[in-house]
Amino acid sequence: MNALKTYLDGLDVREKQLLAMAAVAVVVAIFYWGLWSPLNNAVADEQQALSSAESRLAEMKRAAVEVVNLRASTGKGNVRSGSLSSIVNRTAKAQKVVIARIQPQGEDLQVWIDRVAFNDFLRWLQILKQQYGIDVGSLDLTSEQETGVVRIRRLQLRRG
């Protein structure tokens, strides 16, 4: 300690001022790179993590709303309720699909339709699948002379 004091006493005023400014610069550098910069980087990282978490939360909320809407649209009371033939008959009438003949075949159901608009037929099949879990096992159809109208020679339906 005495050696340092002797050294400092031997410096002229200008050298002492330069040494004091260098000491201040070193203290400021230590404060900046040792404390301020790491804290600032940590805050930025946490803000980015918060933003990412908020976007995931918003995405999950949208997905939850979609799940609720899908559950509501499938209708809890009518899913898989009733016999296969009663569901097919009831939904066909509701969609204005006129069934010419219907025949049970084991657990499946064979359906024949003379004339139906193709779009109405697809809409009916979509309702059977989405609301009642009824799948198409096989399908044999032909087009009619009229555009957009088909004849269902054989449609095999089964529970999914």
Image (cartoon, grey):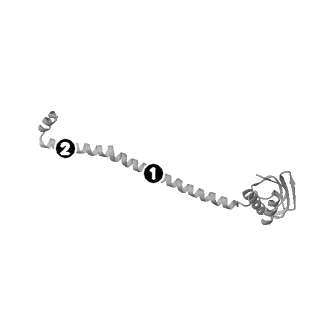
Q: Residue at x 33, y 45 (%)?
A: 35
Q: Residue at x 40, y 47 (%)?
A: 42
Q: Quadrant of the N terminus?
A: top left
Image quadrant where residue 125 sits: bottom right
- Look at mark 1 in the image and give the residue it sits on: 48
Amino acid type for the residue under numbered disc 1:
Gln
Q: Nearer the viewer, residue 5 or 83?
A: 83
Q: Could you tell me residue 23's position as x and y percent?
A: 22, 42
Compute the Cα span from label 1 to label 2. Answer: 40 Å
Disc 1, SS: helix
**Do tag 1 and tag 2 residues touch (Cβ < 8 Å)?**
no
Image quadrant where residue 71 sits: bottom right
Q: Is residue 143 left or right of residue 30?
A: right
Question: What mark, if any, has residue 20 been given in the picture?
Answer: 2
The mark nearer the N terminus, 1 or 2, is 2
Q: Is residue 48 visible?
A: yes
Amino acid type for the residue under numbered disc 2:
Ala
